[in-house]
Amino acid sequence: MLTDGDVTLRPLRLRDAPSWADARRRNVAWLREWEATPPGGRAFVPVSASTFVTMTRRLRAEARRGRALPFAILVRGEFAGQINVGGVVRGSLQSAHLGYWIDERYAGRGVMPTAVALATDHCFDRVGLHRVEVNIRPENAASRRVVEKLGFREEGLRRQFLHIAGGWRDHLSYVLLRGDVPEGLLARWHERQLPRDTPLDVPDRKPRRG
């Protein structure tokens, strides 16, 4: 478990299904434009608990193979979204990519940058990776702001990179290297954070792991 103030990351659990489904139902309109879809499939947002169980079992199987780290995002103990570390490659690459979504009611409050910083530091410090990548549609200004606030560097455009919202979509690739943040990404985020980004009461700025 990774914690900074009111924001916590912990592994996804099967018993998160009701909270996950409830959050997804509330946020269908918020998520539809950015949701991954199978080629040829229509744009839709999965919201059922059974879909969550299937997804979580698959992600946990990938985690056991060392290829993924699926996290729930909690704010003051309440389910607020999801962040997945996927595509973990060892050997001479030592890289992974991040994907995430958040309940709209927590957007713009510094929760997602904190979650991404916690996950990225975990990848660098505990998992021992060299490179973390986030791929974002150019139109997704909110998601781009998350990584830009944290100092991820834009490396270029990936044409028709993923099937999103019913079609093949271009993505911008943002990358952070372990050597870019010797002090840790969470520490950098704390230094850059502005009062308007942190309306939550966060008395303890020291990250905790358990």
Image (cartoon, grey):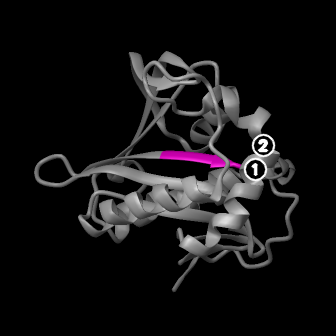
- Between the C-alphas of marks 1 and 2, the distance is 6 Å
Residue under the point 72% across and 65% down: 19
**Magenta highlight on residue 100:** yes
Tell which of 171 and 128 is nearer to you: 171
- Determine crowd level at label 1: few under 14, some 14-19, many 20+ residues with C-alpha closer than 10 A: many
Residues tagged 1 and 2 counted as in contact (Cβ below 8 A): yes
The type of residue carrying mark 2 is Asn
The nearer-to-camera label among 1 and 2 is 2
Position of 13 compared to 156: left or right? right
Task: Examine the image and state in which quarter residue 49 appears.
Answer: bottom right
**Element at label 1:** loop
User: Residue at 11% across / 53% down in the picture?
Assistant: 91
- Which numbered disc, 1 or 2, marks the residue that appears first in the sequence? 2
- The answer to whether residue 125 shows anywhere in this view is yes
Considering every residue shown, the one lying at the far left of the view is 91
| Label 1 sits on residue | 103
Residue 4 % position (x, y)? 65, 72
Residue identifier under label 2: 27
Q: At x 63% / y 46%, what residue is drawn?
A: 101
Instruction: Give the camera-side residue of 51 and 106.
Output: 51
> Is residue 130 on the magenta stretch?
no
Label 2 Cα neighbours within 10 Å, binned few <14 / some 14-19 / many ≥20: some
Residue 166: which quarter of the image?
top right
Part of the protein shown in magenta:
99-103
Left or right position of 210 against 26: left
Residue 48 in the image, given as x and y percentages of width and height: 65, 52
Q: Is residue 108 visible?
A: no
